[in-house]
């Protein structure tokens, strides 16, 4: 019996030792050994996901993917290295010495050139060169060339050489668009030749990127870009911008910048052309800012359109500065309705002073001035608004007519759209829907940013702005039969501590039809030379686009 | 003694039957891999062709292309807007 127990104990001990040792190798050291094993029989390879596409609201892919090929060589299989290098160098237009060096390496796989089109691939394949192969890749393809380039951004490479979206939609939605990179094990035979690949755990093949459906309407974008380009050339300007939004939803219908860049050849352009000036450039808005200040005064019931200005008969002195009107014409005892119609700076100084500093700062905040709008584009900036205690009397006065204060075009358009939308300000949004790899569509709902104005104020201000279009400086450009609410702007450009008298930012902001606005639009012309005034440059571009929009949306004259 | 013999016979018959079934099934599916490979290659080719055709269609359907063709054909932009307005009332209040 004793002998039996000793034998049993011995075997139990041996069994326990084996179990413990197996636990150590299979559980504690499992990961380390697995990696060691992988190195022996294969290498980990990355599976690049296909980047999501970007469609305009009509379902047209404004940014698509196109098939291209990476040409690689297996130097161990190439027999005639000199002639192969010569043939490839001639067809691929690359340096022959570089190719000879690549082919001479002691490797199984050497990349030579990517981005090869299907025709060239067929041409090379027809030669049946041993050791030369192709790998399918996807690259960005822009069917509409550089349309909306600043809005869309571009795809470049990050530090690790992976595709990455920069600027605009590509930058903002990069994580959604790029998808998830997969990983697999490339198994080798005894001689190190690749034989097959197998999955590396769950979800290892990665997932393709999601596609985006924009609120941007391709027809509206095309029209805006065309008219802007024609206008810039006609008025001899340095550049310009157009932004069109649906005031009821905040949907961005078009955003055009000129000059622009070709996203396919982004390397050939300077950095300042990549950026979307519409969301990142600060400028003094000039008279296009007046409706916001006048609306604030109306909203506070400090003034009405019939209120008269008691100090509009000549230049106004504020804090040691003498402030003039844009054309040095003065209208004594003018009404607020006429102040907007004549774009009268002295009347706006009166309105700003009536509003007072505390309310002025409060309304700037309500309009979102000094804050980013939250538009879904990479690169949005916002100016800093001085704290109340740093404002001088002259700052309050000049802010009344849009000088001495900086805004971005998107900020002004968003704030102004509250007048068109019953006093409610909506967040501007470029992407309307997200389409996942299974075809499921997620809709992005419009978001309200706030209500800076009452419904009554917005209606009154709309009529004031309709009057400004009907009787103001830009009346020659208006479209017969349509009620458009709008305001011209001619802002001086601050240069080295003073305003340049010959260079201006000419602009026009407005919405239509006034009774039920379908769009709100801003046109900005940078340093026009044929005329420095917004009424003679930006306004005709605005009305040119508006006419096209009336036809496109089927809006009849009122 | 009869029962164990019967069980053994049944087991042997089952064994032979399963062996036969395995042989038949293996024979049937042995070439499926090749057929599957061919089908997969065909799918890949069609996908590539589709992608290339899609690229061409987008190129032709782009406004940039359509507008240049329209300009070549002599189409010009209409400068005046045509709108159908409401009909005039038969009588108006004074």
Image (spheres, helix red, strand yellow):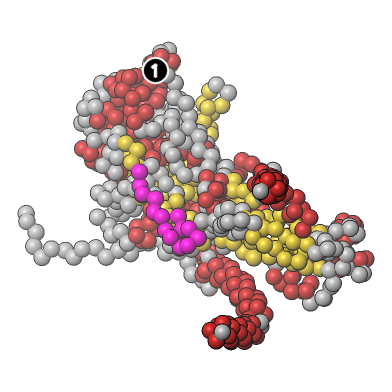
Please name whichever residue, A477 or A433, is drawn nearer the observer in this view of the structure. Answer: A433
Residue at coordinates 69% horizontally, 70% vertically from top-left?
A: A118
Please name whichever residue, B56 or A520, is drawn nearer the observer in this view of the structure. Answer: B56
Q: In this view, does A203 lie above or below A503?
A: below
In the image, taking residue A33 as reference, residue A474 lies left or right, namely: left
Q: How many other residues sit within 10 Å of disc 1, few (<14), some (14-19) or many (≥20)?
A: few
Residue A409 drawn in magenta: no
Residue at coordinates 30% horizontally, 43% vertically from top-left?
A: A420
Q: In this view, does A446 lie above or below A497?
A: below
Read off the magenta span.
A434-447
Q: Is residue A362 above or below residue A208?
A: above
| Residue farthest toward the left in the current orientation of the protein | B94
| Element class at badge 1 | helix
On the image, the x and y values in percent for residue A210 come to 51, 56
Q: Name the residue under label 1.
A: A388
Residue at coordinates 79% horizontally, 55% vertically from top-left?
A: A40
Please name whichever residue, A542 or A386, is drawn nearer the observer in this view of the structure. Answer: A386
């Amino acid at each position: 019996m004793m002998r039996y127990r000793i034998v049993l104990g011995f075997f139990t001990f041996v069994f326990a030792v084996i179990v413990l040792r197996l636990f150590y190798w299979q559980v504690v050291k499992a990961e380390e050994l697995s990696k060691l094993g992988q190195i022996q029989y294969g290498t980990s390879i990355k599976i690049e996901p296909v980047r999501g596409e970007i469609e305009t609201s009509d379902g047209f892919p404004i940014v698509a993917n196109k098939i291209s090929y990476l040409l690689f060589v297996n130097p161990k299989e190439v027999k005639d290295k000199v002639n192969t290098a010569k043939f490839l160098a001639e067809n691929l237009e690359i340096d022959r010495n570089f190719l000879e060096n690549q082919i001479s390496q002691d490797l199984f796989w050497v990349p030579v050139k990517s981005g090869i089109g299907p025709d060239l691939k067929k041409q090379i394949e027809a030669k049946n060169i041993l050791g030369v192969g192709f790998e399918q890749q996807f690259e960005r393809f822009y069917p509409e060339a550089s349309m909306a380039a600043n809005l869309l951004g571009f795809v470049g490479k990050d530090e690790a050489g992976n595709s990455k979206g920069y600027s605009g939609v590509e930058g903002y939605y990069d994580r959604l668009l790029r998808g998830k990179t997969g990983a697999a094990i490339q198994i080798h035979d005894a001689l190190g030749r690749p034989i097959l690949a197998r999955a590396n755990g769950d979800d290892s093949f990665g997932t393709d990127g999601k596609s985006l459906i924009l609120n941007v309407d391709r027809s509206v974008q095309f029209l805006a870009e065309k008219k802007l380009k024609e206008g810039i050339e006609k008025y001899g300007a340095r550049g310009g911008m157009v932004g069109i939004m649906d005031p009821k939803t905040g949907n961005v219908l078009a955003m055009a910048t000129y000059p622009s860049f070709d996203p396919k050849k982004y390397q050939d352009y300077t950095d300042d052309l990549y950026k979307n000036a519409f969301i990142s450039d600060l400028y003094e808005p000039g008279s296009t800012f007046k409706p916001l200040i006048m609306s604030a005064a109306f909203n506070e019931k400090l003034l009405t359109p019939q209120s008269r200005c008691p100090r509009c008969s000549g230049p106004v002195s504020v804090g040691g500065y003498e402030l003039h009107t844009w054309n040095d014409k003065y209208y004594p005892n003018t009404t607020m309705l006429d102040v907007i119609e004549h774009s009268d700076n002295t009347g706006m100084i009166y309105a700003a002073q009536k509003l007072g500093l505390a309310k002025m700062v409060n309304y700037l905040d309500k309009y979102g001035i000094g804050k980013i709008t939250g538009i879904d584009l990479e690169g949005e900036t916002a100016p800093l608004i001085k704290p109340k205690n740093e404002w001088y009397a002259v700052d309050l006065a000049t802010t009344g007519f849009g000088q001495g204060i900086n805004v971005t075009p998107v900020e002004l358009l968003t704030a102004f759209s509250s007048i068109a939308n019953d006093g409610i300000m909506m967040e501007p949004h470029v992407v309307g829907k997200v389409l996942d790899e299974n075809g499921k569509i997620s809709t992005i709902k419009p978001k309200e940013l706030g209500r800076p104005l009452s419904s009554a104020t917005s209606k009154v201000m709309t009529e004031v702005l309709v009057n400004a279009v009907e009787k103001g400086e830009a009346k020659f450009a208006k479209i017969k039969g349509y009620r458009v609410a709008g305001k011209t702007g001619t802002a001086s450009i601050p240069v080295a501590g003073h305003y340049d008298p010959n260079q201006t930012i000419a602009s026009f902001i407005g919405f239509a039809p006034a009774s039920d606005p379908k769009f709100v639009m801003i046109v900005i012309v940078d340093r026009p030379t044929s005329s420095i005034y917004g009424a003679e440059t930006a306004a005709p571009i605005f009305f040119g686009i508006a006419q096209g929009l009336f036809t496109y949306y089927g809006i009849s004259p009122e | 003694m009869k029962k164990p013999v019967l069980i053994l016979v049944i087991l042997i018959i089952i064994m032979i039957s399963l062996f036969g079934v395995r042989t038949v099934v293996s024979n049937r599916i042995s070439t499926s891999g090749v057929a599957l490979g061919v089908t997969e290659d065909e799918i890949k080719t069609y996908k590539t062709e589709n992608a290339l055709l899609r690229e061409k269609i987008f190129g032709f359907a782009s406004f940039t292309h359509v507008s240049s063709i329209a300009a070549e054909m002599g189409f010009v932009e209409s400068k005046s807007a045509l709108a159908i307005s409401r009909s005039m009332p038969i009588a108006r209040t004074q």
